[in-house]
Image (tube, rainbow, N blue to C red):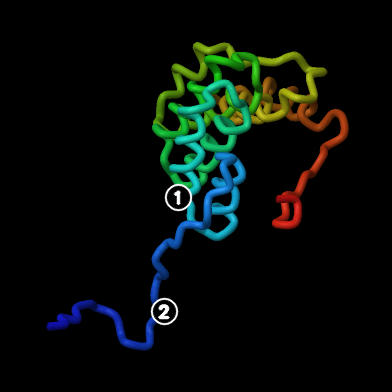
């Protein structure tokens, strides 16, 4: 017996079921392949599983936090970022992800209390400068926001693209 149910027309596009890509043994690569194939949930699961087995691997924590933020899962992103910060407490991307997750949860006071200000000449701190700038704008401190904007625009900006060929 086959029972068909639904609310859409027969001609409407179907959402394909996620088909897991074969595992390579590298949690980050497996997560990125799933993400490339549009399987966000599978990618996040694989990245977090890798983070459990290799907690000191920074790229796993960074990518898991970013994917969780991309997927709108702020609490999960904050947890993944904090997991990475245990081993890499000064990493600006992990600190940014944690701060952004808190902002998305409406916990602005916690972001402020972490004193996420950075030195003006630290090129690796640009994500934190951006977050701090947004917080200054939110609180109406336009002078400080303008100063941070000038600091953010200093130095070269590097763009990196990841393609399937680099895997």
Nearest the eye: 6 or 4 = 4
Which x, y percent locates residue 68? Answer: 47, 40
- Label 2 neighbour load within 10 Å: few <14, some 14-19, many 20+: few
Cα distance between the residues tagged 2 and 1: 22 Å
Is 48 on the left or on the right of 97, as rendered? left
Q: Residue at x 70, y 57 (%)?
A: 164
Q: Residue at x 63, y 28 (%)?
A: 93
Question: Considering only vertical position in the picture, is 94 above or below 32?
Answer: above
Nearest the eye: 100 or 163 = 163
Disc 2 designates what residue? 13
Nearest the eye: 95 or 50 = 50
Farthest bottom residue? Answer: 11
- Which mark sits nearer the N-terminus, 2 or 1? 2
- Label 1 neighbour load within 10 Å: few <14, some 14-19, many 20+: many
Question: Considering only vertical position in the picture, is 87 above or below 97?
Answer: above
Disc 1 designates what residue? 42
Q: Residue at x 43, y 50 (%)?
A: 41
Please identify the quarter of the rendering in which residue 16 is found: bottom left
């Amino acid at each position: 017996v086959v029972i068909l149910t639904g609310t859409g027309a027969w001609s409407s596009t179907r959402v394909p079921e996620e088909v897991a890509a074969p595992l390579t043994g590298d949690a980050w690569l497996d997560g990125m392949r799933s993400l490339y194939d549009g399987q966000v949930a599978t990618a996040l699961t694989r990245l977090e599983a890798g983070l459990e087995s290799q907690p000191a691997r920074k790229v796993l924590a960074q990518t898991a936090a970013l994917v969780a933020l991309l997927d709108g899962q702020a609490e999960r992103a904050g947890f993944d970022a904090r997991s990475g910060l245990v081993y890499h407490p000064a990493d600006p991307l992990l600190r940014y992800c944690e701060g952004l997750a808190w902002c998305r949860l409406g916990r602005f006071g916690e972001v402020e209390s972490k004193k996420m200000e950075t030195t003006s000449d630290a090129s690796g701190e640009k994500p934190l400068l951006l977050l701090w700038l947004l917080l200054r704008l939110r609180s109406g401190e336009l002078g400080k926001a303008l100063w941070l904007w000038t600091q953010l625009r200093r130095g070269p900006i590097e763009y990196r693209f990841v393609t399937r060929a680099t895997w």
